[in-house]
Amino acid sequence: MNVLITGVAGFIGFHVARRLLRAGWQVQGLDSLNDYYDPALKRARLALLESDPGFRFVNADLADRVAMEALFADHAFDRVIHLAAQAGVRYSLENPHAYVDANLAGLLNVLEGCRAQQVAHLVYASSSSVYGLNTRVPFAESDAVDHPVSLYAATKKSGELLAHSYSHLYGLPATGLRFFTVYGPWGRPDMAPIKFARAICAGEAIDIYNQGDMSRDFTYIDDIVEGVVRVLDQIPGMQPGWTPEQGSRGQSSAPYRIFNIGAGQPVGLLDFVRTLETALGVPARKNFLPMQPGDVARTWASTEALRNQTGFSPAVGLEEGVERFVHWFRGYYGVR
Ligand code: NAD
């Protein structure tokens, strides 16, 4: 089986690619290796992937229509896993164009390639940020409000709408995955676990927003990968017996679905910091700050829909996950 993984040098793409290579898949990776965060970390992930003979890599920008058309014209893919995106909430306040280019124009090029090639299944990354200021917890897939509070969230929600329209118009089987705060080895240096761990080890204060009144559904990377792999071969079909009358009542015929992938257990930010302090064996100095624009106070995934569909439930608890993360962190950054 051949799979295209976009964002393959990124945190989640790297882990998904490793898992599929081990299972014998042929993986075509794509990434622009941009400098949003440390390109050396992306190259280190890529070097590990390139040691596997089943792996091929193309350095391309998703928004480059000519390059994307050429990629889909030259290769046949059984599956496409679209993970490349401009991520990060705070960065979107200063760099709005990067989000529209990568997350909308880039996604459109992926959708066009899948349509042209009649790819059997597109699995793409959405985000818990689409829930915006939802207050009903845990967040169930049907509860996403249309009030994204950052440009990042707006592009992720818009991406879901674009994917649905392709699924409806062209019968493209598509599954959207709303990931909840992912952490673990080879994680992103712009996210709290690495930022906090580096600062704590350097004796610097860590920034705690909303005076600490924050919680996140921290999800260990292996659980994310397991969820992605499980949905990959569960291809959504056209809704059986669908009629245009049902359409007029607002029911979609599209072979399309959306799942949360999260631990399903919100963790207070200060509890997360305590777990990290214990694993590092160093106390943190904290700098309490107000809520940041574009941020939300809490996230909490309902895991029911994915469990019902695939039997999947998250396996790695916070303490174990943080210990595994710290083990990698010490080795990669050379911290004792
Ligand atoms: P990441 O930034 O580590 O990986 C994204 C990769 O995409 C990077 O290697 C980057 O170089 C590449 N990329 C960005 N723009 C590109 C472009 N225009 N063309 C080609 N490549 C490009 O992020 P991640 O944490 O691995 O996230 C993967 C996906 O999951 C993203 O779509 C992200 O929005 C989503 N997501 C992640 C989290 C999380 O907690 N990590 C949570 C929710 C959603």
Image (spheres, rainbow, N blue to C red):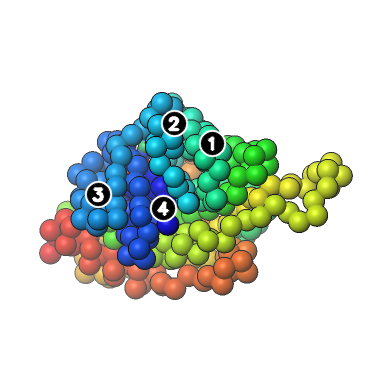
Using the numbered discs, state the Cα–Cα distance from disc 3 to disc 1 in whole angstroms: 28 Å
Q: Which residue is mark 4?
A: 2
Upstream in sequence: badge 1 or badge 4: 4
Q: Are marks 3 and 4 in contact (CB under 8 Å)?
A: no
x then y, percent, for residue 246: 83, 47
**Pointer 2 or 3: first along the chain:** 3
Considering only order in the chain, which callout, 4 or 2, is on the residue closer to the N terminus? Answer: 4
| Mark closer to the chain start, 3 or 4 | 4
Q: Nearer the viewer, mark 3 or mark 1?
A: 1
Q: Residue furthest right?
A: 245
Q: Helix, strand, or loop for circle 4?
A: strand
Q: Which residue lies at the image location 53% right of the left edge and 46% below the top edge?
A: 119
Is ligand 1 less than 8 Å from the beta carbon at label 3?
A: no
| Residue 116 numbered mark, or none | 1
- Residue 315, image x and y in percent? 44, 73
Viewer-side residue, 67 vs 305? 67
How crowded pointer 4 is (Cα within 10 Å; few <14, some 14-19, many 20+) is rated as: some
Question: How far separated are the C-alphas under marks 2 and 3?
Answer: 23 Å
Of the four image quadrants, the one with ligand 1 is top left
Q: Is residue 225 left or right of residue 251?
A: left
Above or below 271: residue 98: above
Q: Quadrant of the C terminus?
A: bottom left
Q: Amino acid at mark 3?
A: Leu
Find disc 2 in the rendering and name its residue: 69
Asked if the residues shown at circle 2 and circle 1 are in contact, with their CB atoms under 8 angstroms apart, the answer is: yes
For label 2, the SS is helix
Q: State yes or no: Cβ of the residue under disc 1 lies below 8 Å from any atom of ligand 1.
A: no
Q: Amino acid at mark 2?
A: Glu
* Image quarter (top left, top right, bottom left or bottom right) of the N terminus: bottom left
Dot 1 crowding, Cα within 10 Å, few <14, some 14–19, many 20+: few
Let me know if residue 66 appears in the view. yes
Q: Nearer the viewer, mark 3 or mark 4?
A: 4
